Amino acid sequence: MRDQDDFLTIGRFARLCRLSVKQLRHYDDTGLLPPARVDPATGYRYYAPGQARDALTVALLRDLDVPLAVIAATLAAAEPERAGLLRAERDRVAERITRDRARLELLERLAAGGGLPGYEIALGREPERQLVVVRAVAGPGELAERIGAGVGRLLAGLHGTSWRPPLWGLFPLDLAEGMRIAVGAEPDRAGEAAEAGKAGEAAEAGKAGEAAEAGGPRRLPGGLERELLPGGPVVETVHHGPYSQLPLAYHALLAAVHERGLRPLAPVREAYLVGPGEAPEQEWTTRLMVRVEERTEETA
């Protein structure tokens, strides 16, 4: 059994390990770093010198804003697994920095312009469009990643099929966790018919036409689906610049919709006129559209 002199008081241990007494008490309460001994009569906590390495590790990782749950898992893990946990935390920090950098650029654009930038808003009319789409589920912070992956899946599924640029993004009116989004393209009808003939899908193509007339999606090989975008009046604008600054365009677009007493209809549409691989991101061009209808007492 250890002699009393082998233990360090909580105050001395805190000073040696660059932690506060309050932190050590909290880490004891949460089970992250319990003391080696608690005096049953006084409740005083005592720590063993061998606990210093774990305590210093906790202090270092907390200074890096690593969550306590990750620190606990790291302390409990063997060396190879510990390195994997820290790499995963590094990746999460890198993602957060990327999001923060985008926010900073957005604020810099607002500050440089003395407020919200002006967008030219137009009321136009959009034709009915038959798209081939891939779908995904995303949260607001995952849109760029999910859209990029969706474009890859879409182009792979359309390999050998002619389609008309641009690519399209379809989004709900309200951005929320678990929202359904889609990326699509408008096939060239002549090329699509030829491909259907080669594949011997004449009967299935007839069913597709019926589904399209009904406005319903139809599943295709490769995880693709058909989606009919109804035509009608739209409020639209054009955004020039990186996708991270699209919220500025949406602010102007949706404000104009409501100021004109119109009711927006999902999905919101993005047409990627100039995008990655075609120009520097400051020259990317995105057309934003939302289909609208006049508000009535029933829809207000």
Image (spheres, helix red, strand yellow):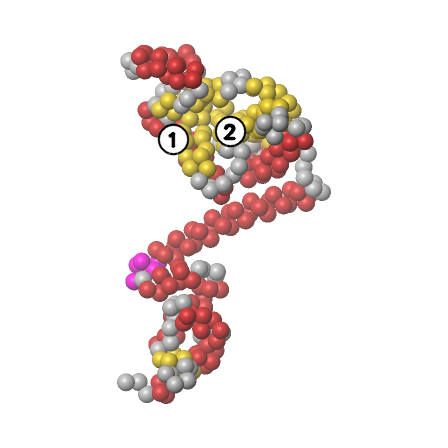
Q: Where's the N terminus, which quadrant?
A: bottom left
What separation in Å lies between label 1 and label 2 (alpha carbons)?
A: 21 Å
The circle on residue 153 is: 1
Identity of the residue furthest to the front in this view = 298
Q: Secondary structure at mark 2?
A: strand
Magenta region, residue range: 78-83
Residue 41 location, quadrant: bottom left
Q: Which one is nearer the viewer's eye here, 195 or 226?
A: 226
Instruction: Measuring from the top left, give residue 250's x and y in whole percent.
Output: 60, 34
Image vertical order of residue 206 relative to residue 65, above or below: above
Q: Where's the C terminus, which quadrant?
A: top right
Q: Residue at x 29, y 62 (%)?
A: 78
Q: Residue at x 39, y 18 (%)?
A: 211
User: Pointer 2: what residue?
Assistant: 267
Q: Residue at x 41, y 11 (%)?
A: 190
Q: Is residue 104 left or right of residue 51?
A: right
